[in-house]
Amino acid sequence: MPVLPQSDLQKVEFMEAHLALWTTNATAIGLTAAQVTAMGTATTAARTGFNGQQSAKAAAKAATANFHNLVRTLADLASDAIKAIKLKSAQNNDPNVYVLANIPAPQPPSPPPPPAPPTDLIADPNADGTISLKWKGSVANSTFFSVWRKLGGSTTWVNIGSTAMKSFDDSAVPANPIPASITYSIRSQRGNELSAPSVQAEVVYGGPGVGFFSGAEAFAFTGAGANSPDSAANGTTRQAA
């Protein structure tokens, strides 16, 4: 381990701690008077340099803080000026105000991204013959949802309603004739812009005594007649691509 410390300040402190002793015992410890004198001068100079560095550091810190405060005041004034320029342009409907001020005119807002397709669509038949739909999606930027239905045996999708909610009850399930199945899909919509369809969800008519169901299980009717879809019972959900 070295006797002389590593850091500059520790070197100065080391010499300050040893200089008087080395001066007293110079000959006994093998030093000349010239060496001791030179080290004393160098130690005093180094301490003075350190003190000056610390003072300069403190002054720099204070000057930096003062600079930031001055710029903050300047920025507030400049911000108020820019607001006044924008107001002048808006009041007179004159974009040339920005040219005279040599600042960029505001850009029109970017159009929102296309509506994203809803996800996780679930179709659940109810005991009263309705079918409840639930899904996930975003209603940001005035987006709403359109509900589409396709009956078994048909290739035609029909829009049966729109909603800003993430759920919908189909209360107009066809009863005559009863479809073999009903498939649903949801699309996000903003104005006339439609998203791609969501994944489809299908419910199946299980026949007399069963009604509509979804998933692997059928449930017995409770209430309405056996041949009426109004007597559909609840089931688990099956999603089809």
Image: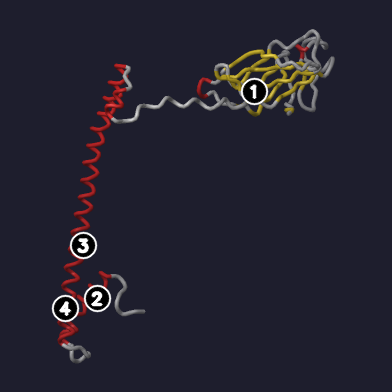
Along the polypeptide, which appears first: circle 3 or circle 1?
A: 3
Q: Amino acid at mark 2?
A: Phe
10 Å neighbourhood of mark 1: few (<14), some, or many (≥20)? some
**Label of residue 53 in the image:** 3
Residue 10: numbered disc: none
Q: Which mark is residue 14?
A: 2
What numbered label is drawn on residue 134?
Answer: 1
153 vs 138, left or right, is right
CA separation, marks 4 and 1?
A: 87 Å
Per the model, the C-alpha gap separating discs 2 and 1 is 78 Å
Q: Would you name the residue on which mark 4 appears?
A: 40
Task: Say which quarter of the image contains residue 215.
Answer: top right
Task: Give the label, 2 or 3, closer to the camera.
Answer: 3
Indicate the quadrant containing the C terminus: top left, top right, bottom left or bottom right. top right
Which callout, 4 or 1, points to the residue nearer the camera? Answer: 4
| Residue toward you, 15 or 237 | 15
Q: Residue furthest top?
A: 176
Q: Look at the picture and state if 187 lies above or below 9.
A: above
The answer to whether 70 is drawn above or below residue 112 in the figure is below
CA–CA distance between discs 3 and 1? 71 Å
Upstream in sequence: badge 2 or badge 1: 2
Q: Secondary structure at mark 2?
A: helix
| Amino acid on which disc 1 is placed | Lys
Q: Quadrant of residue 10?
A: bottom left
